[in-house]
Each structure stands twice: as C-alpha cells, then as structure tokens.
Amino acid sequence: MSKARICVGAIMGAYGVRGEVRLKSFCADPRAIGDYGPLWSEDGARQFTLTLGAQVAQGFAARLGGVNSRDAADALRGVRLFVDRDRLANLPDDEFYHADLIGMQVFDTGGAELGRVKAVLNHGASDLLEIVAPGRKGAILLPFTQTAVPTVDLASRRIIADPPEGLLE
C-alpha cells in the first residue's frame, strides 16, 4: 500500500441480513472514520461510501455503498479500509500517525542504531514501538512516551530514543 493512503479501519464481517457490515475503526475518535470517505480497499480496486450505524461490540454497524446482502457483506470480512492521505487532519508537532512511524530508523541518544519501527502497538495503556534489527533476537518494545522517545524527525525519518534502563539487556 502506498503512503498516499492510510488504513483507518477493517471490515469484521456481516451484521444482520440486509448487507450491513461490522466495522472496526482504527481512528483516535472511532466515529471519525465516517467523516473521511470515500474509503478504498487495500489494492485500490474498490471504493466504498460509508454510513455509520449503531455502535456494536468492537466497532460499528455500517452500510457500504453497493453492498446489499449478507453474503456480499460477509465476503468483505477482513478487508482493510484506506483513506487518501490528504483527507486526514494535520497533527500538532507532538502527535503522529502510526503509518508515519513505521519504517523509521531508531537510534539511541549516543547515536547507535537500535533498529527500525516494525509496528506501533497499543494494548490499552499506551503506544509501544516495536523495533526490530537484523541479527537481534526478538523485538524491542519501546514505550512511545516523551521520556523514552524525545525526538521524532519525520523529515529525516529518524527517531532518537532514550530506552528505560534494562530494556536492551
């Protein structure tokens, strides 16, 4: 997927019998997914208009343009939905889209390379950067806090990290 589009949600399966889907939003404000339209499939082959319905377990009931049956809705299970990058809001200097962080090189405060950001994870408490490096067994899970990550330079695609003591041993 090109950086021109950002993943904002995924279809979890059919909801009901009239073609609605159960939609999981990846937006900070989950309802914001309904404001971006149109949404695209990952390969860019399909475009969807979206109408959000009621909040349901782990997401929303939603209507996608052109999806009119339970079978059609269920066939979309697992499809990730993308929005054109230029439709997203500009963020303050201390906030970042996860897609911008993935692939960035990470260095410690002494200049030694720690690896690259493979993913940004959140298991409820706060974001973690999953950092991988060739030849290193396992990933580093670095808290994405101002203390542990004092510098994110989007222009040079570099992160300067000050990992908590004991994290790298």
Image: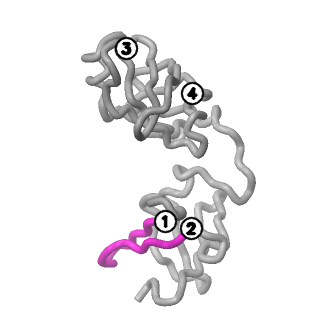
Residue drawn at the location 33% of the way across and 20% of the way down:
16
Q: Is residue 56 within the magenta segment?
A: no
Q: Is residue 142 within the magenta segment?
A: yes
Marks 1 and 2 in Cβ contact (< 8 Å): yes
> What's the CA distance linking mark 1 and mark 4?
28 Å
Residue projecting furthest to the right = 92
Residue assigned mark 3: 67
Which amino acid is tagged 1?
Leu
Q: Which of marks 4 and 2 is nearer the N terminus?
A: 4
**Element on which disc 4 rests:** helix
19 left or right of 151 in image: left
* Few, some or many residues within 10 Å of mark 3 (<14, 14–19, 20+): some
Residue assigned mark 1: 129
* Few, some or many residues within 10 Å of mark 1 (<14, 14–19, 20+): many
Q: Which of marks 3 and 2 is nearer the N terminus?
A: 3
* Few, some or many residues within 10 Å of mark 4 (<14, 14–19, 20+): some
Which amino acid is tagged 3?
Val
> What's the CA distance linking mark 1 and mark 2?
6 Å
Q: Where in the figure is residue 121, as x and y percent of width and height?
A: 45, 59
**Between marks 4 and 2 in the image, the one whose residue lies nearer the viewer:** 4
Which amino acid is tagged 4?
Gly
Magenta segment boundaries in residue numbering = 130-143
Q: In which quarter of the image is residue 144?
A: bottom right
**Element on which disc 1 rests:** strand
Q: Earlier in the sequence, mark 1 or mark 2?
A: 1
Residue drawn at the location 57% of the way across and 24% of the way down:
37
Indicate whether 37 appears above or below 125: above
> What's the CA distance linking mark 4 and mark 2?
28 Å
